[in-house]
Image: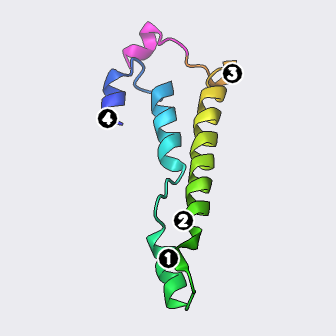
Amino acid sequence: MAELQRLNPNKNIASNSMVTFLAMNDSCITLVPATVIAVRSSAGSANPTEIIGAVILATAIGFSVAIVAAKTLQRFPVFRIQAPTPEAQNV
């Protein structure tokens, strides 16, 4: 994020790349749910790892929705980044 901020021409507003990066990080990427497997194992589940497929599917869907939402919203005028004015750069 620090590198993206360094490249950002308007330091007071997050760039589209920063918003997309944040959406990717907040989509809760989980490849192996170790805690859930441990809880299921300690609860006596016959096959505690059977949820891995569902978790990977849910992660892929959540990640895809986050990216599509970030890319779609940046096209709307209300979310579009305006070019920095000279007055704003001096602040």
**Residue 29: in magenta span:** no
Q: Secondary structure at mark 4?
A: helix
Alpha carbon distance from label 2 to label 1: 9 Å
* Disc 3 to disc 4, C-alpha distance: 26 Å
The number of callouts visible is 4
Q: Are marks 2 and 1 in contact (CB under 8 Å)?
A: yes
- Residue at x-position 69% and y-position 21%: 76
Q: Where does residue 91 sit, x and y in percent of width and height?
A: 38, 20
Element type at mark 1: helix
Which residue lies under the disc numbered 1? 37
Q: Nearer the viewer, mark 3 or mark 1?
A: 1
Q: Residues within 10 Å of mark 4 (few under 14, many from 20)?
A: few
Residue 43 location (% of width, % of height): 55, 90
The prevailing secondary structure element of the residues shown in magenta is: loop
Query: Is 7 located above or below residue 48 in the figure?
Result: above
Q: CA distance from mark 3 to mark 1?
A: 42 Å
Give the Cα separation between the discs numbered 2 and 3.
37 Å
- Point out the tag, 4 or 2, that comes first from the N-terminus: 4
User: Disc 1 residue type?
Assistant: Ile
Question: Is 87 covered by the magenta stretch?
Answer: yes
Q: Earlier in the sequence, mark 2 or mark 3?
A: 2
Question: Residue 31: where, in percent of width, then height?
Answer: 47, 58
Name the residue carrying label 3. 76
Q: Which mark is residue 52?
A: 2
Q: Earlier in the sequence, mark 3 or mark 4?
A: 4
Return the mark for residue 2: 4
Q: Which residues are magenta?
A: 82-91
Q: Residue at x 36, y 36 (%)?
A: 1
Image vertical order of residue 32 relative to residue 5, above or below = below
Q: Is residue 66 visible?
A: yes
Of the image marks 2 and 1, the number of the one nearer the N terminus = 1
